[in-house]
Image (spheres, rainbow, N blue to C red):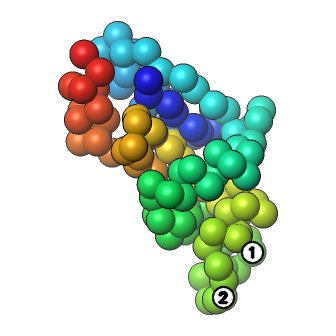
Amino acid sequence: MIRIIGRNKCNKTKKAQRFFKERNIKFQYNDLDERELTAGELNNILKILPAENLLDTDSREYKKRGMTFMEFDCAQELFEDQLLLKTPIIISGKKASAGYDENFCSQIASQEK
């Protein structure tokens, strides 16, 4: 089962959802604005992807907090503020991707059929 974690306002999340819908591939969607990830869920994702890959350095929150010139623990910041997550996070089994990556989506789509 494919899982997409994102926000309804995020165009890249919408693009990922559309990609799988157009190919009639079922997925589970988690809207971070309705329900944030639990510590356990985020830990499981961090086992697959490094925290640096999950941190959205282009996000408004990242810039607002002036994190460009700060030293910090990426994982700790993600636990404290999930607005810093790069969306969508697409998970399929032991594979995951942060941000929309059409090649990754194509790979997991071919495995789901």
Q: What's the distance in space between the residues labelled 2 and 1, CA to CA? A: 9 Å
Residue at (50%, 31%) from the top-left corner? Answer: 3
Look at the numbered disc 2 and give the secondary structure of its residue. loop
Crowding near pointer 2: few (<14 within 10 Å), some, many (20+)?
Answer: few
- Whether residue 100 is visible here, answered yes or no, is no
Question: Which label number is shown at residue 56?
Answer: none
Which corner quadrant of the image does residue 79 belong to? bottom right
Say which label, 2 or 1, has the lower sequence index. Answer: 1
The amino acid type found where label 1 is placed reads Arg
Asked if 28 appears above or below 86 in the picture, the reply is above
The amino acid type found where label 2 is placed reads Met
**In the rendered view, does 3 fall on the left or right side of 96?**
right
Residue at (37%, 21%) from the top-left corner? Answer: 20
Residue 106 at what x, y percent from top left?
A: 24, 32
Look at the numbered disc 1 and give the secondary structure of its residue. loop
Question: Which label number is shown at residue 65?
Answer: 1
For the N terminus, which image quadrant?
top left
- Whether residue 41 is visible here, answered yes or no, is yes
* The one of 50 and 31 positioned closer to us in this rendering: 50
Which corner quadrant of the image does residue 18 belong to? top left
Residue at the disc numbered 2:
70
**In the rendered view, does 29 fall on the left or right side of 100?**
right
Asked if 62 appears above or below 8 in the picture, the reply is below
Say whether marks 2 and 1 touch (CB < 8 Å): yes
